Image: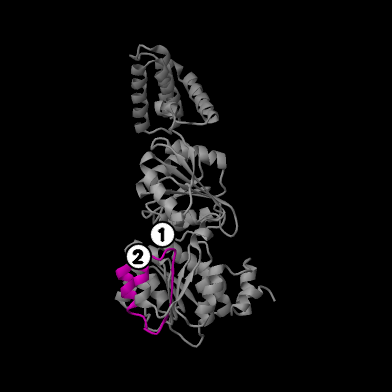
Amino acid sequence: MNNRPFEALGIRHELVDQLHRSGIDEPTPVQKQVIPAALAGRDVLAQAQTGTGKTLAFILPILESLSDKRSSTQALILAPTRELAIQISDEMKKLVPVTGASVLAVYGGQDVERQIRQLRDAPAVIVATPGRLLDHLRRQTVHIRGIRQLVLDEADQMLHMGFLPEVQEIIEQTPTDRQTLLFSATLSDAVRRLAAAYTREAVDIRIQGKTVTLEGIEQIAYETTDRGKLPTLLQLLEEHNPYLAVVFCRTKIRAKKLTANLQEHGAQVDELHGDLTQAKREQVMKRFREAKLQVLVATDVAARGLDVEGVTHIFNYDIPGDAESYIHRIGRTGRAGQQGSAITLLTTRDAEAMQAIERAIGMSVTRRDGQGRSTADQAGLGGQSAGRRKRMSDRSSADAQKRGARTGGRRDRNKPQQAESRSSKRHGKGSGTRSKRDDRAGATSSRTSRQGGSSDAAGGRRGRRKR
């Protein structure tokens, strides 16, 4: 019989065979500890991060416990984001054919009336986000009074995102004799209070999160400037050529802007943030999972629960606000025994935040020089690699030759510098890749170069070619 380890944990052989067909043969540490406790009917408080196999740790006991004699909803799984809810339901749908059970994902961005029709059939398992489920509860279009199992996945993130009142209101509408499984990457005081309020003599399971999440992940911090971040990222993408990469930004606006900049440089990239419609989000994730995109630019909230096989690189374009977010971000690479790279771009004002992260994870992150750190970079060189500077210079010269007849009539007395400045500007207009802000920056650099002497002028010319 295949997959004896899972059978030894109490999983029926039909499910074990289905796991084997999916390439899953050996239980992870969190599965080895959670599954027996859950099958014994115990409440569980488990500290386990994304990528540890925690989803199967609660899916398998639920599927084992479902009764085909009941026509009502038997299990409820709460997740902080729709992406995570979709991911969990997709994992369950791979296994439910063995049991004949039905699974429904309920989250915002879907047609409410369609959800209401689906909920009338009382699916055996509901995977939901707190906001949309509470909406249905208030409409009385879903009934959870008879559930036997409740799972709170990524509880710390639900609380971090402000869902505590919704979660409490939902739990109050479930039976008091239910089984509760709570999973969290970190066990903050708020998570412990939640567990104390809604679990009974829970089995406390700790998976060594730092070891599990950070093992096999090369962590590097490139010291740069705000202006040097984009050229640094472009150079790193060129040097590393990741199979799949996720780039994290602090805000939706920054994610949109970075995506546009990367697209202008020819990257296979798209964005994932809260402003996207659900249809667009699903389309983006489908393309990313199928490797039709190489780079996904995302915000933290939008990427919660993101679990895509083959992510080789994580780039922190903006440093995360705390160690928890850092661990959640980089935990999306280096999975299933594979190697991964986590690269953070640091400015001088990020020093304290990076030191706090290093203290929290118990290790030092290797520092390297990024773009914009040297004197030449500050003068406008921008730290482009020699090859990229030459390519951009060649393109600029070609454009200048095509438009050479339009170079006269400028007021600048420094003719060599004047010709090169106009060539750079015409190249930007012809290629369509420079913004008005870049043109203004180029003009400012030109004026600074004329005031600062020949050395500064040379740096300014190189900087304009880079931009």
Does the image show residue 121?
no
Viewer can see residue 305: yes
Residue, far right: 1
Gap between marks 2 and 1, in whole Å?
Answer: 23 Å
Which amino acid, by three-letter code, is at mark 2?
Leu
Residue 233 lies, in percent from the top left, at 47, 40
Residue 436: give its label. none
Quadrant of the image containing the C terminus: top left
Q: Give the residue at mark 1.
A: 278
Quadrant (top left/top right/bottom left/bottom right) for the N terminus: bottom right
The residue where tag 2 is placed is 159
The span picked out in magenta is 164-193
Reply above or below: 324 against 319.
below
Q: Does label 2 or label 1 sit earlier along the sequence?
A: 2
Is 397 covered by the magenta stretch?
no
Q: Residue at x 38, y 44 (%)?
A: 350
Q: Nearer the viewer, residue 184 or 354?
A: 354
The picture places residue 285, in percent across and down from the top left corner, at 48, 56
